[in-house]
Image (cartoon, rainbow, N blue to C red):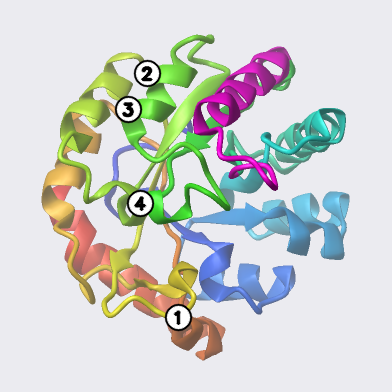
């Protein structure tokens, strides 16, 4: 878990997915120009820019890297390929100075209906990766995704399920993501946040809103905090009470947001953090 001094704007991060079409240098420039001190990176634009060049660029800009997205997809039948890719992702996170590698664990293998078995595959794969994460000083952060993604993206649907797996391993190696879009609906989410905090396992807190009607592609139904139906107060206060002191990332998947100028999106993300999230810190 990253360790920043207090919260306020010092603890805010712009996840690169929020400005999806920006190249890495454009994303860094928009983040810096908006006065945001941290950025959450994605592997694809980092690879396009070059790993070493990306680390140098972010460092020279004076930015922290709050997380790297994404590892995971551990339910695939090609287990060896998945493990090898995640080991590369761990090394990339370490090179970039990211404390956290976010894991989207994967959905059902093609032709399978065995959710229980798929979750066991996730647990076993993380067990093989935990030592690599420890050696690199990286936290593998299991991200529970909303149940509508259970078949194609993540067989882990609740924060409680994520903790059930994470707690089988050293807390320094395996943690969880609290993403408001994915967990706000869960009647047990506040208790799960407290449970994760008691174990020192909250590795990332990501914020965006739930927009209705759901988009044709439900992946794109996220919005700026304050534009949708999520009550950010209880979740944010619970995360703080649980002891989390890392960066708070704004991560939005929304076509209208993606089509807007990058600098405008960065400034709006900061403004919503200050008006919607910061009052609860």
Tell which tag, 1 or 4, sits nearer the viewer: 1
Question: Magenta includes 35?
Answer: no
Against 128, residue 97 (above or below) is below
Which residue is the site of mark 1? 216
Q: Quadrant of residue 133?
A: top right
Looking at the image, which residue is at 49% across and 9% down? 168
Point out the tag, 3 or 1, that comes first from the N-terminus.
3
Q: Main secondary structure of the magenta part?
A: helix
Give how far apart the Cα atoms at labels 4 and 3 are: 12 Å
Earlier in the chain: of badge 4 and badge 3, it is: 3
Q: Nearer the viewer, mark 2 or mark 4?
A: 4
Q: CA distance from mark 2 to mark 3?
A: 14 Å
The picture quadrant where one finds residue 246 is: top left
| Mark 2 / mark 3, whichever is N-terminal | 3
Q: Is residue 21 left or right of residue 247?
A: right
Separation of residues labelled 1 and 2 (CA atoms): 37 Å
Q: Earlier in the sequence, mark 1 or mark 4?
A: 4
User: What is the C-alpha distance between the residues marked 2 and 4?
Assistant: 20 Å
Residue 20: x %, y % from top left: 61, 73
Query: Which residue is identified by label 2?
Result: 200
Provide the residue designation for mark 3.
160
Where does the magenta region start and end? 107-131
Mark whose residue sits in front, 3 or 1: 1
């Amino acid at each position: 878990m990253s360790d920043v001094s207090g919260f306020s704007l010092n603890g805010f991060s712009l996840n690169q997915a929020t400005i999806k079409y920006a190249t890495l240098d454009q994303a860094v420039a928009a983040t810096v120009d908006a006065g945001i001190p941290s950025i959450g990176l994605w592997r694809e634009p980092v690879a396009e820019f070059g790993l070493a060049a990306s680390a140098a660029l972010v460092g020279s800009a004076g930015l922290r890297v709050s997380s790297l997205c994404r590892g995971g997809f551990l339910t695939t039948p090609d287990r060896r390929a998945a493990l090898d890719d995640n080991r590369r992702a761990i090394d990339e996170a370490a090179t970039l100075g990211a404390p956290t590698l976010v894991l989207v664990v994967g959905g059902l293998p093609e032709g399978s209906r065995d959710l229980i078995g798929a979750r066991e595959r996730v647990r076993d794969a993380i067990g093989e990766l935990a030592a690599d994460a420890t050696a690199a000083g990286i936290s593998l952060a299991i991200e529970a995704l909303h149940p509508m993604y259970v078949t194609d993206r993540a067989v882990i649907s609740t924060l409680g399920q994520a903790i059930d797996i994470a707690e089988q391993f050293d807390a320094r190696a395996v943690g969880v993501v609290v993403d408001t879009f994915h967990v706000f609906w869960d009647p047990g989410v506040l208790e799960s946040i407290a449970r994760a905090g008691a174990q020192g396992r909250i590795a990332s807190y990501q914020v965006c809103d739930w927009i209705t009607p759901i988009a044709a592609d439900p992946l794109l139904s996220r919005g700026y905090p304050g534009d949708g139906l999520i009550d950010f107060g209880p979740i944010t206060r619970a995360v703080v009470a649980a002891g989390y002191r890392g960066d708070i990332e704004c991560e939005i998947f929304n076509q209208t947001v993606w089509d807007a100028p990058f600098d405008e999106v960065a400034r709006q993300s900061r403004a919503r953090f200050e008006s919607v999230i910061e009052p609860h810190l």
